[in-house]
Amino acid sequence: MPARIELVEGGYECAVRSAEALLADFETARRLRAELDEEPLPADQRIEWMEKLTKARSSAEGSVAALQQVEALILQL
């Protein structure tokens, strides 16, 4: 079981780094578009990205719920 926990921990660390990199990329893109006085992206592009992000966030929330259940089970062992 310790190896499984370490595997999950590593996966989460990677996911957090990826989310932080995504945030930085979007902050940079927003700043550059503002500096260049660019028009907002087309609505369909923003909607597509939001749908993908919503799916990713839902997966993350589901995994948190699973981890909470694992915590409860660990306390019962």
Image (cartoon, grey):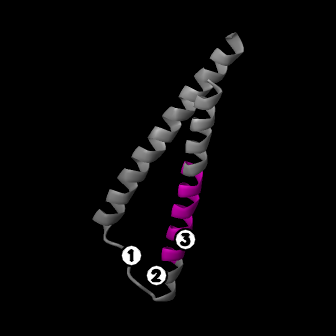
Q: Earlier in the sequence, mark 3 or mark 1?
A: 3
Q: Give how far across and how far down residue 42 sits, in percent.
A: 31, 71
Q: Which residues are magenta?
A: 15-30
Kind of residue sitting beneath label 3: Glu
Question: Residue under circle 3?
Answer: 27
Alpha carbon separation for disc pair 2 and 3: 10 Å
Q: Give how far across and how far down residue 40 sits, in percent.
A: 39, 75
Residue 25 magenta-highlighted:
yes
Secondary element at tag 1: loop
Q: How many marks?
A: 3
Q: Look at 55% across and 63% down and name the residue there.
A: 21
Kind of residue sitting beneath label 1: Pro
Secondary element at tag 3: helix
Relative to the observer, which residue lies in front, 75 or 36?
A: 75
Alpha carbon separation for disc pair 2 and 1: 8 Å
Q: Earlier in the sequence, mark 2 or mark 1?
A: 2
Q: Which residue is situated farthest in the front direction here?
A: 3
Q: Earlier in the sequence, mark 2 or mark 3?
A: 3
Question: Residue under circle 2?
Answer: 33
Question: Residue under circle 1?
Answer: 40
Position of residue 59 in the picture relative to residue 1 (left or right) = left
Dot 1, how many residues are within 10 Å of its Cα: few (below 14), some (14-19), or many (20+)? few
Task: Determine contact: label 2, label 1, CB under 8 Å.
Answer: yes
Q: Which residue is situated farthest in the right direction here?
A: 75
Q: What secondary structure do most residues of the magenta stretch adopt? A: helix
Tell me the number on the disc at residue 10. none
Quadrant for the C terminus in the image: top right
